[in-house]
Amino acid sequence: MTQPPFHPYTQVSMNRKIRQLQSFFYSQNFSDGLRITIGVLLPALLFSYLGQLQTGITISLGALGTSLADSPGPAVHRRNGMLVCMGVCAVVAWCTVLARLHPVTLGLEIFVLSFVFSMWQVYGMRATLIGLAGLLVLILSMDRPLALNQVLPYGLLVLGGGVWYLLLSLLTFQIMPYRPAQQALGECILEVANFLRIKAGFYRPQANLQQEYRKLVTQQIVVSEKQDAVREVLFKTRQIVKESTDTGRKLVMTFVDLVDLYEQITAIHYDYATILEKFGPTGILDQISGLVENLADELENIGFAMQANLKLTHRPDFQQKLEHLKASIDALDNQLEETSTLVLKKVLVNIRTIAQRLADIISYHNPQAAHRASLTHTLEFGQFVSHQNFSPRLFLDNLTFGSSVFRFSLRVALVALFAYVLTKFFPYGQHSYWVLLTVVFILKPAFSLTKQRNVERVVGTLVGGVIGLLILYLVRNETAQFLFLLLFMTGFYTVQRINYVLSVILMTPFMLILFSFLGAGGLAIVEERVIDTVVGCAIAFAATYFVFPNWESQQVGRFARGVLEANLNYLQVLAHGLAGQEIAEVQYKLARKEVYVKSANLSAAFQRMSGEPKRKQRNSQQVYEFVVLNHVLSSYIANVVSERLATGAKGYPKPFLRPIRRAQLSLTEAIRQLAPQFQAPEPEHEAPEPAAETLPTLSAEDRLLAEQLEFIRKISADIQKLTRQITAAQKTPAPKQAAAAE
């Protein structure tokens, strides 16, 4: 089918809110939301029409549980996950309707299954969602008054609902096999565009560098998550990796170039404070910032076109703007005789490379260009994706209080049992299981995430309850109410993965309208839901604080060690290049990917720590500086390495290699402060030092390189000092509550 043409520059002036709305409707979340809504709602509607509403609701429950395993990823993983989830939901349904015959057996089932399903976190996100699906079926089956002869049919209906949803999902993939990859890649491109836009802010003369760094660190987490999602979809999907079609080649090569482009964006990193001081009054930085913004706009257009499956027909030409910037930089050479503009010329080179990467990505919409490009890339893509270990040994090895997953699982089990017992002794309303449902879905391993979910759950329930009541009292027409239910239901399943408070706001009115259709609507049901939600949130919040707490300040050392080792490995790649050795593309890109992933993990841990009580945080300012310095270090390494790859292998004299050796020693010592048993890699052989060449006779470009290498050495030394401070803080007991927390 011929794709409609897409002209990027006609969209540049479009209101950004409209563009974001369009992107939302083309997103993977919206298409998944539509599929889940159809899969869950259709059985209930069909069997209600046939006079078998309870049968339809049971089938819909099976479809709802199975839909949780249908999270983004390769089609084969989604299929396997749904198959497992179907079996889990059916078995849990059978066990629950039998266990509910006595309160003690039901309480025992809640405790055991809450613990086991929470422990499935060790097997990754999809396994975690399957466990949540099992708990959902357990909770929603608790109050089903079934006779013994109805037990087997009930479980079979739940299983049938799972089969129905599985077939619907597989049919969608069969009709549109490339859409999940296109949507994931488009969303990744859009987030990289946002990252580039933040980078532009560093060149504004009035920039607040500390605020810009905070935004950059936050966006780095998002980009890393999106890149991992694309790797999963692309490199674990045989049909795409084998590049059997033009579409597959285009997707793979676009992502490969996107990661290289992201490196170039990261490499536009210099001593910003010095640049702002030297060149802020000249006006040249506004030009640089504006041009980088234009590149971000163009990248955003590419991401939107990819996400919407539209054809790019216009190839951007930044040549005129680049030449104008070059002329402005050259003019500064005459105006600032005592100040070198070489750093600005380096920035210009980076911007040129980014513009060329954008042109390359657009060229892949030409099938012949995509085919030619694919022949030049021989990366072994399987090395760039993680492979989940499903060995039972992994589960058993985590059955210890030293495992954060074990402590969290035990917390969930104890609190779920407490919530169940509480509602048995103090029953309120007809849906007391809402307390248990709230507890199970609110509790998260990190305190900050649980606290955030608590606030969002209460606010969302209150706002959604008001909206639901207004619709029920003002809209009396049942058809109109059903349309509202359909709207809220689709919206809930669309945003449940990306915006929790909005998902709760949408879920509450659709639940109220649904109960109204079942004859239980009105103010009483809203009051019951609000009270149950508040009680569940209070229990979850208290449990996170008092029941086997898991404070990020105690975990940050593990993430710090990961990023230090990744940067040390990255430095090793740089040392190879400076020593004149050939840099292997696969090893280099693997090292680069490891830096991005580990840096994002550390940044996420810092953000979680920032949401914890102040008295539980230790040296939060030092940890923030540690995060920023490691980002600066990896950016400088990327800057220098990318230039070495562009210019080819060239050996440098010892004065160049010495700062790298010292930087490696600093990072090694920093790692040993966190892990004394760490074994440093063997030192590389140094390149021979040319006898006639000394630093004073080097070119301006080589002097700039020497300054960059010295800066890398200084940053590494600062990181070592910060690591010492962070380690000392971890060893020092926190005031008062530390002993209890431990």
Image (cartoon, rainbow, N blue to C red):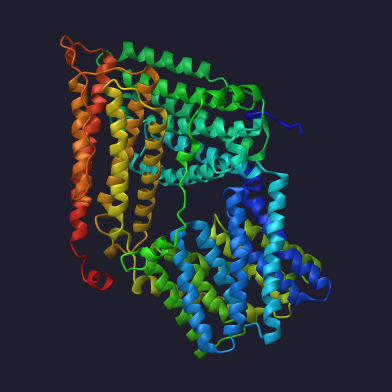
Is residue 535 visible in the rendered image? The answer is no
Residue 16: quarter of image:
top right
Q: Nearer the viewer, residue 429 or 147?
A: 147
How many numbered marks does the figure carry? 0
What residue do we see at 56% from left, 35% from top? 300
Q: Where is residue 107 in the image (x, y as percent from the top left)?
A: 50, 83
What residue do we see at 38% from left, 67% from top? 406
Q: Where is residue 55 in the image (x, y as percent from the top left)?
A: 75, 75
Residue 57 located left or right of residue 133: right
Q: Nearer the viewer, residue 192 or 173?
A: 173
Quadrant in the picture for the C terminus: bottom left
Residue 711 located left or right of residue 98: left
Residue 303 located left or right of residue 289: right
Quadrant in the picture for the N terminus: top right
Instruction: Check the image and name the residue furthest to the right.
Output: 50
Q: Where is residue 424 in the image (x, y as percent from the top left)?
A: 52, 88
Q: Nearer the viewer, residue 690 or 600?
A: 690
Please determine whether, in this image, residue 462 is positioned above or below residue 653: below
Q: Where is residue 358 in the image (x, y as percent from the top left)?
A: 53, 27
What residue do we see at 38% from left, 33% from top? 587
Please determine whether, in this image, residue 96 is positioned above or below residue 610: below
Residue 622 located left or right of residue 381: left
Please determine whether, in this image, residue 563 is positioned above or below residue 649: below
Is residue 315 visible in the rendered image? The answer is yes
